[in-house]
Image (tube, coloured by chain):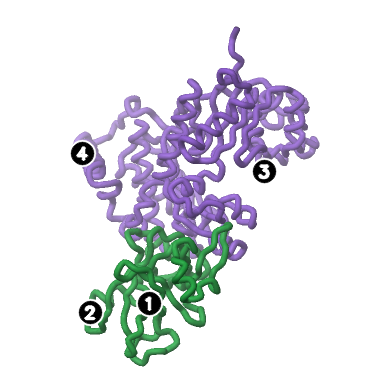
Chain colours: A green, B purple
Amino acid sequence: MCAGITLAWSELPTELIGRHNLHRIALERGGEKEVRFLFRDRRPRLPIWRDGRLQVVRWGNGRGQSRFLPRTGWTWQSTIDEGGWRNSGAIPVDIPATLGLERGIWYRVRQGIRGLLVPDERGIAVVYMICEPASHYYQVMTRSDRMPVLIQERI
Amino acid sequence: MRTPTAVGFLDADCFYVSAERVRDSFLMKKPVGVLGNQGACVIARSYEMKGAGVDVAMPVWEARAICPEGIYVKRDFRWYEVLSRAMLGVVRDISARVEYYSIDEFFFAVGPMPGLSFQETAEAIRAKILAEVGVSVTVGIARTRTLAKLLAKSAKPEGARAMLGRDGETALLADRPVTAITGIAGRRAKRLLPWNILTCLDLARADRRLVRDLLTATGEALWWELNGEAVQPIRPERVAHKTLSRGGSFGESTLDPIILYAWLVRNLERLIEELEYHGVRAGRLTVWVGYKDGQSGVGQANLAVPADRFDLLLDVARPCLRAAWVPRVPAARMQVIAEHLVPRGRAQIGLFDDPESAARAEAVARLKREINLRHGRFALRSAATLPLAAIYKDNANGYDICDVRGKGCF
């Protein structure tokens, strides 16, 4: 599954960079600065669009910070469709991304990835990346059987 | 006074990557690889990725290891064709004789533009393509096709060079290995080795009769070209095909004969489209299968009567696949090749053809064509291809490099 994304430095407001110390996870590629959000980070986070505002929130519950939320960073589209998140207060959000990372392969993402934002028992916003069965191309490229649900894009 | 003319050669720099950058400026200056073979291999890479050591045809997993910052994008031949034809249009504005050599290479007759030297003309053409299409190209202008191509290859990327004098040509040829000439690869280069012919200049200075003996008439033509005699014409029209083929990599290798058969049927249906487009029938069919361990298998059969009908060709292709099949070895790629092509109107009619069944098969083929024309390529296809549902689901697999028509070579 998609273990990270990048967002171009230029797409992040300075205030957000400062508040979340994003310069610590910034790197350069081809002379352009980008921020890398990885699930393996000590504090995994993801950017999301919510109510027309770009925010940075906790990515999943991999470290078990919540006793109630699933201990992962991803959720199946089919789980959502089947009502698995009903009554959890979950809302769909967009995760902006310029690149996705899967098993060391960086691939281009044109718009972003679908996400699901849920509050934990303390009211802290947590985002899960929504995934679906991998397309044949994605499976061959990354050897992964699941892929993120991309916004208005199918690879 | 007659305007002097020369041969121009235009070659896009890492074309597929440049094409992706035209519509996605984010990829500029970054190490980018375009993936083919359903995502398995790098089929084009940017100069940044090339610099890291990634080769064309390298599996994505190897490329990842040596270029961990590389960005991978999916191939899109529909888009590449749009830009290729736009480049062709620009070159046709400049020259009345243009050969569409490959998707990103063009030969053309060229004289100096008004008020410009040949060198300035090469630079002007490069700038025009960049301004009008957005693709970075290299242009070479020389006395012959072979020299123009060698010159352009030596000036890549973003180069523009004109060379019409012997002194410059000698330096160019001395600097290039003989394998830099299109048409001289491994086996031919090996034949030249005992004669100490290592560089292009060695070949140009070798005895013409010796070159003919070693490399046949094709080699002799190259010899003339290297010595500044244009013997290979620019062909504005594509020469009629001697063979037609369809196939390629499976992406994932397979041991399953049902999947192998599905690929055979897919390739055959694509081949029939091509036979119909060119208005020819096949007199011989070859099925070639490449295996993961490096071996290959071939099955070949002549048709009693040249055909372009699915049922007749499949009857021939099936035993060919059986002959090419190596059990218990994963198969990785396949080509289905039609030879002994006969124009449709001149094809012989079989003595034992049942006119009724022929008419029925023709009607089915017509219906299939019409449905696919209206509802999309492969909307109606043989049920034998069902194991390849994932391949058909991906729109990118519906259009390949070989579907870009009119160009001289792959």
Tell which subunit mark 1 falls on: A
Q: Secondary structure at mark 4?
A: helix
Identity of the residue furthest to the bottom in this view: A67
Residue holding disc 2: A83
The amino acid on which the numbered mark 3 sits, given as a three-letter code, is Gly
Q: Secondary structure at mark 3?
A: helix
Residue holding disc 4: B363
The answer to whether B213 is drawn above or below residue A71 in the figure is above
The amino acid on which the numbered mark 2 sits, given as a three-letter code, is Gly
Residue at (56%, 61%) from the top-left corner? Answer: A29
Look at the image and tell me whether residue B301 can be seen: no
Residue holding disc 3: B186
For marks 2 and 4, give the one nearer the viewer.
Answer: 2
Residue at (47%, 51%) from the top-left corner? Answer: B25
Image coords of residue B324 (percent x, y): 47, 52
Count residues near mark 3 (Cα–Cα under 10 Å), then give few for <14, some for 14-19, many for 20+: few
Count residues near mark 4 (Cα–Cα under 10 Å), then give few for <14, some for 14-19, many for 20+: few
Q: Which mark is residue A74?
A: 1
For marks 2 and 3, give the one nearer the viewer.
Answer: 2
Seen from the viewer's position, the closer of residues A137 and B293 is A137
